[in-house]
Image: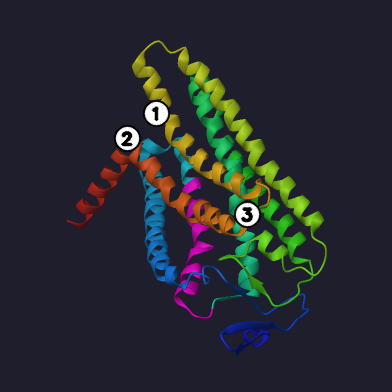
Amino acid sequence: MFIDLLNFYVSGNEETLIVTPVNESIPLEFILLGFSDRPWLEFPLFVVFFISYMVTIFGNLTIILVSRLDSRLQTPMYFFLTNLSLLDLCYTTSTVPQLLVNLHSARKVISYAGCVAQLFIFLALGATECVLLPVMSFDRFVAICRPLHYSVIMHQRRCLQLAAASWITGFSNAMWLSVLTLQLPLCGPFVLDHFLCEVPALLKLSCVDTTANEAELFFLSMLFHLVPFTLIAISYAFIARAVLRIQSAEGRQKALGTCGSHLLVVSLFYGTAISMYLQPPSPSSKDRGKMVSLFYGIVAPMLNPLIYTLRNKEVKEAFKRLVVRVFSIRK
């Protein structure tokens, strides 16, 4: 047990931590420190994260149901939005329940198997979203810049291929990074100064030099963040040029209305993710990493459905029709 690794003694007014070194490649469990250095914050954070998780579940499930059940939303844009909602739903579920348990418990641990699963799922879904967002921008590019060829280019088979490519790419990246990280020998005590199992936190427990792993993580972060972000920027440059050529103000507003929600989601996701992985280390990197992980792992998935529902007239009308249909069935 990990409690045996930590022995405390008190000498006068000074409390000293004695750590018994342990060298095991596969521990039974990890201690997640999370926010234990600020115990007065744990209960307020528990309430906030619980409410956020409930909002995330309700919002993303609503978008999935509305997009699938309303015939007017059977379009490529809402097909990709359904994929994004499913991804965000799984994204938060991979971390928030464990986080809530640890915030409510004095013994903040996660099993080795649970840590491996959390690491893999978090990496896979994060990378999948990095690829899915430029796919969604490509859909908007075709809709605005090639409207007459939209149904020919974005046919059902191609949409399925693009969505499948996003998921396969994300899970392949997670498999590669997970294997590279988990094959490293670990030294005890197995304490992660984080609220979830992430690659940087696990690398700190390694008994060997992790320079190659850190370089690999940096390269893949560049690949999955900057390259997709560049593709999105290029797509919207063409979109902006096409919108400026539209003569009527109503036509411009309609074209931009379909892109505004996606641009907000892109700004939230890539802005926080890039600041997490691409900024140089600093004395505040530990707390910054936790806060940024909270944002793109919990806050952003909660805001995404709100952005798409509050700014999208079609989704709001479809939701109203769904509510009317449900109440009419009950009567």
| Element marked by disc 2 | helix
CA distance for labels 3 and 2:
32 Å
Question: Residue placed at 79% from the left, 60% from the top?
Answer: 210
Q: Are marks 2 and 1 in contact (CB under 8 Å)?
A: yes
Total label count? 3
Q: On the image, which quarter does residue 259 sit in? A: top left
Question: Residue placed at 60% from the left, 56% from the top?
Answer: 284
Q: On the image, which quarter does residue 190 sit in? A: bottom right
Residue beneath label 2, please? 313
Residue beneath label 3, please? 124
Amino acid under disc 1:
Gly
Residue 30 drawn at (x, y percent) = 63, 75
Q: Quadrant of the N terminus?
A: bottom right
Queried whether the magenta region covers residue 30, the answer comes back as no
Residue 249 drawn at (x, y percent) = 35, 15
CA distance for labels 1 and 3:
30 Å
Predominant secondary structure in magenta? helix
Residue 217 drawn at (x, y percent) = 72, 52
Amino acid under disc 2:
Lys
Task: Give 144 or 158, whichever is nearer the viewer.
Answer: 144
Amino acid under disc 3:
Ala
Q: Start and end of the magenta stretch?
A: 84-107
Q: On the image, which quarter does residue 43 sit in? A: bottom left
Q: Which mark is residue 257?
A: 1
Question: How many other residues sit within 10 Å of disc 1, few (<14), some (14-19) or many (≥20)?
Answer: some
2 vs 1, front mark: 1
